[in-house]
Image: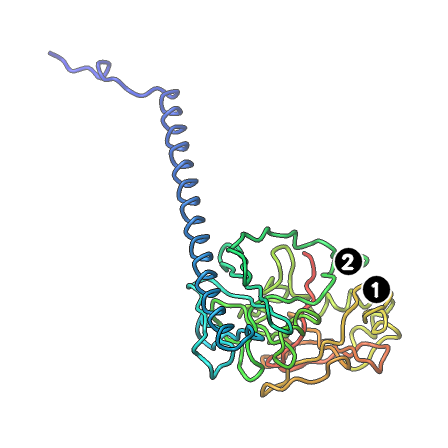
Amino acid sequence: MIYSRRNQSAFTIIELLVVIVVIAILAAVTIVAYTGITQKAIASALQSDLTSAQKQLKLYYVDNGSYPEDLILQNGTTTYCPTPEDTRYCVKASPGNTFNYASEEPYSTFTLTATNTASSTTYSITDNTSPELVAEEDPFLDWITIGTQTWDHENLNVGTMITGATEQTDNSTVEKYCYDNNSANCTTYGGLYQWNEAMQYVTTEGVQGICPTGSHIPSDNDWKILEMQLGMSQGDADATGWRGTDQGTQLKTGGTSGLNMPLAAYRGGGGFFDGLLVVTDLGSSSESDGANAWRRWIDVYSATVYRTPDVKGTGFSVRCLKN
């Protein structure tokens, strides 16, 4: 008998397409199922972290008659304590999660949020509630458009507070300074960040850094564009020192720009804070050399804007710019 290939059955093009479609559907179902399982695991870890922390904070209340004024992240860990010295009431976040704590005098209540840094999923708990999912807000609500640019309407306030005496480090947690180590000052004036932390440890000009997705740390040129849109000449914008006419006044709280930049002070080298309600130090993503980056200063005494290189270790305010 002579073997003939005509006797072999073979897939037609249509059959092959059907197989491909079926495989694609199965793959999609698998991905959706995996994503759902992952999200459930994230939510479970966040809720568990908050429930455990709530029990620990209530124990603090029983022993002290009030809740802690703040919880401070211990350097190099995911542990938060009322003070670095008092470790009896510390709370611990799971890997990849961060806490943000708030309480006000007479410290009879508190709000604690836990955020998964990879997914930005956030849950919140208080002294008398169970963990609740926090709905994600549009990061570009209430931003201000000036000419060709759209700026955040307030100084950035993201991350976990650490003390001024501690250097911000490259870890899984965004870290911030609050003036005088008081978290209420971050709520009012925004956080203070060292250059490397704000940039998230890259040196690319215009990088997103710690800004919301769809925005970035303004470059030195971005600041010049803003200043010129407020009436500064190109020659003044390119100069250093105090420049312009009234652009500082326009940028400050109550100024005609609408940006209402508060005099939020700075964190100096060595960990001291200075200048609240006197000066603000505004960062850029542009290096002037390896140790310094371009900055803007606005102060209570001057109507103009100061442009200078400054050391990267100084803690400054971040005002994000939409891409």
In-front residue for pair 3/241: 241
Q: Rounded to the nearest whole Å, what is the CA distance between mark 2 and mark 1?
A: 9 Å
Check the image and report above or below for 38 versus 115: above
Q: What residue lies at 36% left-to-right and 24% top-to-bottom?
A: 16
Q: Which mark is residue 58?
A: none
Q: Amino acid at mark 1?
A: Ser
Secondary structure found at label 1 = loop
Residue furthest to the top in view is 1
Q: Residue 262 in the image: state x and y as whole percent.
A: 76, 72
Question: Which coloring applies here?
Answer: rainbow
Q: According to the image, label 1 marks what residue?
A: 257
Q: Residue 232 in the image: state x and y as whole percent.
A: 85, 70
Q: Quadrant of residue 292?
A: bottom right
Say left or right for 255 vs 100. Answer: right
Q: Amino acid at mark 2?
A: Ile
Check the image and report above or below for 145 versus 180: above
Closer to the chain start, of discs 2 and 1, is 2
In-front residue for pair 12/231: 231
Q: Quadrant of residue 52?
A: bottom left
Secondary structure found at label 2 = strand
Q: Residue 189 in the image: state x and y as whole percent.
A: 70, 72
Q: What residue lies at 38% left-to-right and 21% top-to-bottom?
A: 13
Q: Residue 214 in the image: state x and y as whole percent.
A: 63, 55
Quarter of the figure with the N terminus: top left
Q: Are marks 2 and 1 in contact (CB under 8 Å)?
A: yes
**10 Å crowding of disc 1: few (<14), some (14-19), many (20+):** many
Quarter of the figure with the C terminus: bottom right
Say left or right for 88 vs 107. Answer: left
In this rendering, the count of numbered labels is 2
Q: According to the image, label 2 marks what residue?
A: 144
Q: Quadrant of residue 194?
A: bottom right
